[in-house]
Image (tube, rainbow, N blue to C red):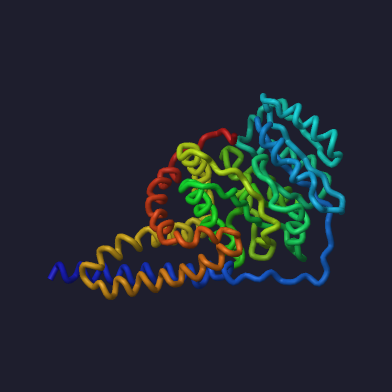
Amino acid sequence: MILKHWSEAIIILLFIVTLIQLAYYLVIFSRLAFYKPKQKLNSQEQPVSVIVCAKNEAKNLLKNLPGVLVQNYKTTHEVILVDDNSTDDSKYVIEELQRAFKILNPIKLKQEARLTTGKKFPLSMGIKAARYETLLLTDADCVPASDNWIKIMQDGFNDGTEIVLGYGAYHKAPGILNKIIRFETFHSALQYLSYALAGMPYMGVGRNLSYKKGVFLRNNGFSSYSQVPGGDDDLFINAAATKTNTNIVIDLQAHTLSEPKRTWEKWLNQKYRHYSTAKYYKKKHRLLLGLYSATQFLIYPLTVAALFYSWKLALLFFCIRLSAQAIIFNKTMKKLNEADLFPMFVLFDMWMCVYYLMFLPALFKRPNKKWN
């Protein structure tokens, strides 16, 4: 009798978990999978201030910053480079680039921030110095995917739009770590871009993010979470983004590309730092994201357990969810230029169970105060 009750409970729980997962894929994630940007009848270029913060990034500046400086953007724009107390050869690299590109406006910080942590202080100084209302942010280790990056990202501003979320991809390279990093990046983008389309924007990535200077000032910058090392991108968007003021741009030419970490240790440290800010999200976002992660984790142990009691129902539920997932992943991976990951999506989905266990402590751990 007890065994029968347990078997029924497992089947029912698997059914509920499968329904919840289907709701996320069919109601939320499908918005990105089938997303078609509206064609603008009139497109007008606006002056743009591109802001890049760097700390001991001489090699990356030499390799990536020219891609930002040679953009095909005829309208007035500037590139603000905030050098945050670098002690490497950044000074000499910046001087050489400034001679070649008059639009480069370097800002040298010679003092450490006392009231803010992480990248927020140098970024705030860059925003303060910006001459134009439209801000476009990226990092020193990022390079635009094309010379139309500025043009396409600023074209995402429609009437009433104050925030535009872009996609920050990673360079493709051999090896399983590269694929895992890129899948995790894709999986995060699937969520935050889909939520934005569903009218519930909750984060963006500083590698490719644009917003109006006015919305930054109106929300008092980063003052609400000044002691949190991260959050210059996701926590700001979580506080400032609304259903009506946020748009997305996923055009392949508007992506940015970064060098992924080359060792497991460095990648793990990076992800721990990123996840330590999630506990500061709005409650509704924490609940929605937590429910998705929990059900995604539970789907595998529940399926295995259900196989012993009703293998037909277990496989039916699993295959229904897998079919919906395959359709959504296939379409979104193509949109985000990650289609080479699709043949392994089931393995990556299983890997996410391990991933959640690995980074669960980051939600409770005090974050590192260094941003670089």
Q: Is residue 102 above or below residue 166?
A: above
Count of number-bearing discs: 0
Q: Position of residue 277 (x, y in %)?
A: 53, 45
Q: Quadrant of the N terminus?
A: bottom left
Q: Residue at x 44, y 59 (%)?
A: 344
Quarter-of-image position of residue 308: bottom left
Q: Position of residue 30 (x, y in %)?
A: 54, 70
Relative to the observer, which residue lies in front, 156 or 111?
Answer: 156
State the residue lying farthest toward the left.
1
Q: Position of residue 12 (x, y in %)?
A: 29, 71
Q: Quadrant of the C terminus?
A: top right
Residue 98 makes an appearance in the image: yes
Q: Is residue 311 above or below residue 372?
A: below
Q: Residue at x 42, y 59 (%)?
A: 349
Q: Residue at x 48, y 50 (%)?
A: 180
Q: Is residue 263 above or below residue 77?
A: above
Relative to the observer, which residue lies in front, 346 or 217?
Answer: 346
Residue 282 placement, left or right of 35: left
Q: Position of residue 110 (x, y in %)?
A: 72, 26
Residue 214 makes an appearance in the image: no
Quarter-of-image position of residue 293: bottom left
